[in-house]
Amino acid sequence: MLFICPHCNKKHTIDEKKIPATATKARCSNCGKPFALNKTQQPSAEAPAEKKAPPVKKEGDSVVRKLGISLSKGGVGKSTTSINLSSGLALAGFKVLLIDTDTQGQDSFMLGLKPKAGLTELVTGELSPKECLTKARDNLWVLAGGKNLAGVKRLIDRKDYGGEMTVAEALKPVENTFDFVIVDTSPGWDPLTVNVLFYINELLIPVALDIMALQGLSEFLRSISSIQKYRPELELKYILPTFEDKRVKRTSRILNKIGKIYGDRLCDPIRYNVRLSEAPAYGKTIYEYAPGCNGAQDYRELVRKVANDPSLLS
């Protein structure tokens, strides 16, 4: 029988013969929450799944998924993942806001943009939210980063209290018009990264398949646990292996080790693909530059997992 978790819409196929007669509830392996085993109302496992269109976002609607892409170590594919996950969700019909919190401002460059304003002007109130947003593609808007964010860090540091909520407060007027807010963070651990962790509800961590990245992951997770004491709603949702190269034996061993630890949180790996590194030079996403390559296929699969819809971009 097919059971669907009402909390996260995860589908579970369970053999009816293995369900004890007295069982009334099961626990979802995806979100960990219990749900009722209503045998009379659940659809058959053989019944075709109904394809659902992405929800239409109405202005003022408070349901928005806020997902941060973060790891204190650099060179693991955070910006590449932010760009291609955001643009993939936009291609699937969702309204997406991509926020760059790095002083290098690479996300705008990778999308071929030259924004006149961004996150700095929104936080300081110099410009209206509409003036700070830059439309990058259909359904995709960007709040640009850049060197001016150094001033935002100083602004946060000067606050006597509530500095960790600075970015969250600035984003309130704009976030509810989107289905997804994707936040790309800088390497390291600074006031802006802490602000992001006090804003998002879901965390995606890209991990390059090498030993140093694993060490960076363990250190970063210790820092995350200190934030979760104050924000229990912050959830480690996805672990994304990057730079998978099957020619290197150690890569497979590291991937298997991560899989044993993180289980359902583990996403299908992003294979090493030279097209992913070439696309930013042309200001294009991987779907625009090389839609048939392995990198595009892997990021489409990530979009399906994050949106919890296997029919997207197929």
Image (cartoon, rainbow, N blue to C red):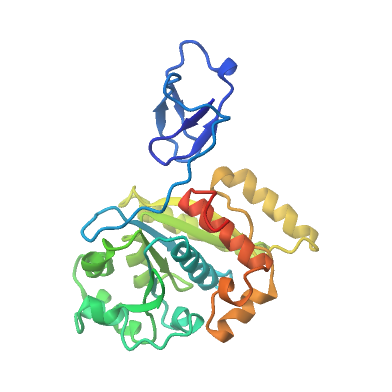
Instruction: Give the image quarter of residue 199.
Output: bottom left
Judged left or right of residue 259, residue 170 is left
* Coordinates of residue 47 in the picture (x, y in percent): 54, 31
Q: Residue at x 63, y 47 (%)?
A: 259
* Residue 22 is at least partly visible in this image: yes
Is 168 rendered above or below residue 5? below
For the residue pair 253 and 97, the one nearer the viewer reads as: 97
Judged left or right of residue 156, residue 283 is right
Quadrant into which the N terminus falls: top right
Instruction: Give the image quarter of residue 176.
Output: bottom left
Q: How many marks?
A: 0
* Coordinates of residue 65 in the picture (x, y in percent): 36, 55
Quadrant into which the C terminus falls: bottom right
For the residue pair 214 and 283, the one nearer the viewer reads as: 283
Judged left or right of residue 37, residue 284 is right
For the residue pair 69 and 307, the one nearer the viewer reads as: 307
For the residue pair 59 and 50, the one nearer the viewer reads as: 50
* Coordinates of residue 161 in the picture (x, y in percent): 19, 66
Q: Residue at x 74, y 55 (%)?
A: 252
* Residue 154 is at least partly visible in this image: no
* Coordinates of residue 135 in the picture (x, y in percent): 36, 78
Is 116 rendered above or below residue 141? below
Q: Residue at x 32, y 52 (%)?
A: 231
Is 79 rendered above or below residue 203? below
Judged left or right of residue 22, residue 157 is left
Is 116 rendered above or below residue 274? below
